[in-house]
Amino acid sequence: MYDIIEQHRIQDQILKERLETVLPEIMRETGTECWVIASREYNEDPMFPHIVPSMYPHARRMTILIFSMKDDVLDRISVSFPDQFLDRYYRHDFDRTKETQMQALARVLHELDPAKITLNISDSYAYTDGLSAGLYRVFMKELPGDLTSRFTSNDQAGIRLMETRTETELKYYPEVMDLALQIISDAFSPKVIHPGVTTCRDVMDFMIRRVNELGITTWFNPDIDLQNGTGMHGEETVIQKGDLLHCDFGIEYMNMRTDTQRLCYVRKDGETEAPEELRNALKRNNRFQDIVREQMKVGKTGNEVFLDSIAQGKAEGLRPVLYTHPLGLFGHSCGPIIGLWTDQNPIYPAGELIVHEHTSYALELSIIEYLEMYGRDTYIFTEESVVLVNDHVDFLCEGREHFFLI
């Protein structure tokens, strides 16, 4: 792990790339001429932590940032209180001794004179719905009508900016994933799990404590459950020999999220590995992973990937369930949804978003297998953090071919 100063350095390098390399391309691609992102302290826009430096964790009273594309040149402007960290990335243009913040905003917008002014207001996507109702009312009340009449929204701009991974993110993402996998490996080990004694909740608590010791956070509480001949069980269930354990675990580290599901088999006396039918089930599950990877092509919609993957999986004799989602700056992140656990159908509108380059996903899915060892249908749950680069989906870590063993 990196110390906090080095983490800040890496995060700020990523920010520099996002603002200087990714942002101009996204504004051209989406036809965004002027984009105003405003936040109040402790009620920040979801985009806020990803467009400001690491030493600027909250809006100062009110932070107003403007992205303006004029004559194919991007200008980044801060109509906010001066700040030594923020002003390294944005041109400061507000003197509170001479004008109010709304007067400064009106002046800057009149100087830019865009045909449309994009605000983060959305009916469909949380990431692009960050302008609070209160701030919108302030804008409508205090800005002149010739500006408010130009207000518009643009979901694609926010989604594309947030879903696109920078080169530095792609460089460090495998290290973030390695950290998450280390915690899973420690949890699914004889140091933690003692058959007949340890509960699923005990393993969850270990993971929570380990995350806290490392000084990182999770974006959802770890989930541990198990399957055996009597069904699927969780939390207070005591782990026994012959059980199939499953974890769902995701960390936040340097503004990047992971999302991983791995399996662990608790060996019975005399067993040196998982039973053959269980190993075969994992191979079949991994085949479905590869089917989805093959179908995730740039230019396809999430719904097309979903339908084509399910069809191919069934054609190969699998009983597939698919619920892959974007991953990155958020856990359930910006970009196309590829099925839902609760709805195995095309999803609207998020499923109609298109797969793009330099993006990241949680390859989340399962197959249903009848296992003689349990005498029942069993879910083979897996989830791998992946990146899509050069129209190919690659895993951020190894080990998907194996069970953890107790």
Image (tube, rainbow, N blue to C red):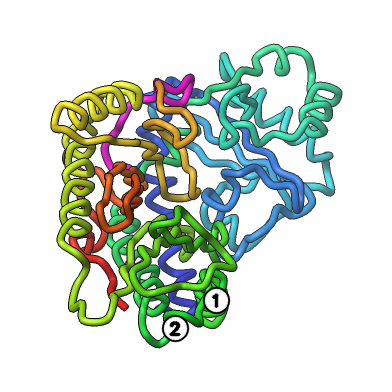
Location of residue 287 (image quadrant): top left
Residue closest to the eye, 12 or 252: 252
- Circle 1 SS class: helix
Identify the residue at horizontal 49%, vertical 77% (top origin): 5
Identify the residue at horizontal 53%, vertical 22% (top origin): 154
| Residue 76 percent location from the top left of the image | 53, 41
* Image quadrant containing the N terminus: bottom left
382 with respect to 94 (left or right)? left
Q: Is residue 12 visible?
A: no
**Three-letter residue code for mark 1:** Asp
Residue indicated by mark 1: 202
Q: Is residue 353 magenta?
A: yes
Give the numbered dot on residue 98. Answer: none
Picture layout, residue 240 above or below residue 395: below
| Residue 57 percent location from the top left of the image | 64, 60
**Three-letter residue code for mark 2:** Val
Identify the residue at horizontal 51%, vertical 69% (top origin): 200
212 with respect to 277 (left or right)? right
Residue closest to the eye, 355 or 295: 295
The stretch in magenta equals 346-359
Residue closest to the eye, 197 or 142: 197
Residue closest to the eye, 61 or 212: 212
Location of residue 178 (image quadrant): bottom left
Give the numbered dot on residue 192. Answer: 2
158 with respect to 406 (left or right)? right
308 with respect to 71 (left or right)? left
Residues marked 2 and 1 touching at CB (< 8 Å): yes
| Residue 251 percent location from the top left of the image | 47, 63
| Residue 91 percent location from the top left of the image | 57, 47
How busy is the neighbourhood of tag 1: few (under 14 within 10 Å), some, or many (20 plus)?
Answer: many
